[in-house]
Image (cartoon, grey):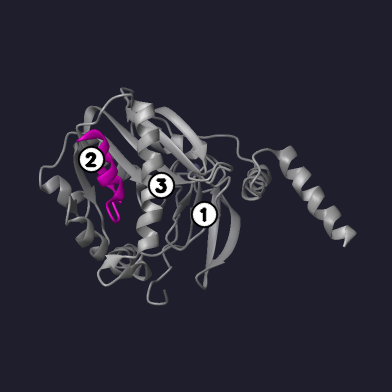
Amino acid sequence: MTEYHFDYEVVHCPLCDSSSFSLFETTVNRGITLHNWICKRCGLVFLSPRMDVESVEKFYRSKYRVHDIERDKPIQWVVEKEETRALYQIDLLEDWIGKVPHRLLDIGASSGRLLHIATQKFNCVSVGIEPGDNYRAYASQNFKLYLNIESLIAASEKQFDVITMSHVLEHLDEPIKFLSTLRKYVLQEDGVLFIEVPNLYGHSCFEPAHLYAFTDKTLSMMLRMAGFDILKVKMHSAPRDFGWRNISILARLSSRSRIKYPRQFVFPPYIKFQRSVGLSGTRHWYGYLFSQTKKFLTMYDS
Ligand SMILES: [Zn+2]
């Protein structure tokens, strides 16, 4: 990662434009020290400094999943993991929308498992966007894949009634701008957007390529800022039964015209406590206190 420069500093909150932040957590991941901040006005947690735009592009085209590729195709366990995740997401999506999509776009299509499962289940037209060259080449054997949103729009691919984005939004430098582009140019008027991201309250979250760590609240606020209304939200750890590592959300185009910058009461110690609770694998503070007390007593006993 040494050839990538982490020197771009965030000056204004990407969600509410405030410049009042406090340091939330410092972590070391893949040998890089990462500082994540919390906005005091809206509660968004974000990485700063982060990679500059050129480094990000280079990183996703070649480096991001380089170890997951063997002889020009993704290694088996990666495909299996993506399959399990996509099966859950397509079931959830079907349950939530209650109808069959006709044109589905998967952004961050990776090995194409979600495209495959959706096509089998719904018999729909499935198109993907994948920035990683090797993964795009692999998934292109069966589906139409684009490098980025710009090339998709340039090819006049639009009017999708379902757009899925699984573990992508937290990687985007300008997520609101990206979501607005989907709203304006790609999503059909009565279409829906399905997003899944890691949950700050349950997932370790902090990695060099994760620019944001969302809660259900900040994710909802971001979608509203980009012109969407929220239809469904779910926290889960699928395919595992317990915990809430991820947030899935379903949104549709909003008819509201004027949107104000969001704000919420932000008390970082409470947010950190909730994060510790989620990371311990329990869902509530009393479960957390019970597990901590048990751990302490076990230590004391031995
Ligand atoms: Zn903010």
* Contact between labelled residues 2 and 3, with CB atoms less than 8 Å apart: no
Q: Earlier in the sequence, mark 3 or mark 1?
A: 3
Residue 277 spot, x, y in % from top left? 67, 45
Q: Earlier in the sequence, mark 3 or mark 2?
A: 3
Residue 80 quadrant? bottom left
The answer to whether residue 229 shows anywhere in this view is no
Label 3: how many Cα within 10 Å (few below 14, some 14–19, many 20+): some
User: In the displayed image of the protein, which residue is found farthest to the left?
Assistant: 155
Residue 195 spot, x, y in % from top left? 38, 40
> Residue 85 has which mark?
3
Which residue is identified by label 2?
119
Tell me what residue is drawn at x 63 percent, y 44 percent. Answer: 271
Confirm whether the magenta stretch covers residue 121. Answer: yes
Residue 214 spot, x, y in % from top left? 49, 45
Residue flagged by tag 1: what amino acid is it?
Answer: Cys
Q: Which residues are magenta?
A: 105-123
Q: Nearer the viewer, mark 3 or mark 1?
A: 3
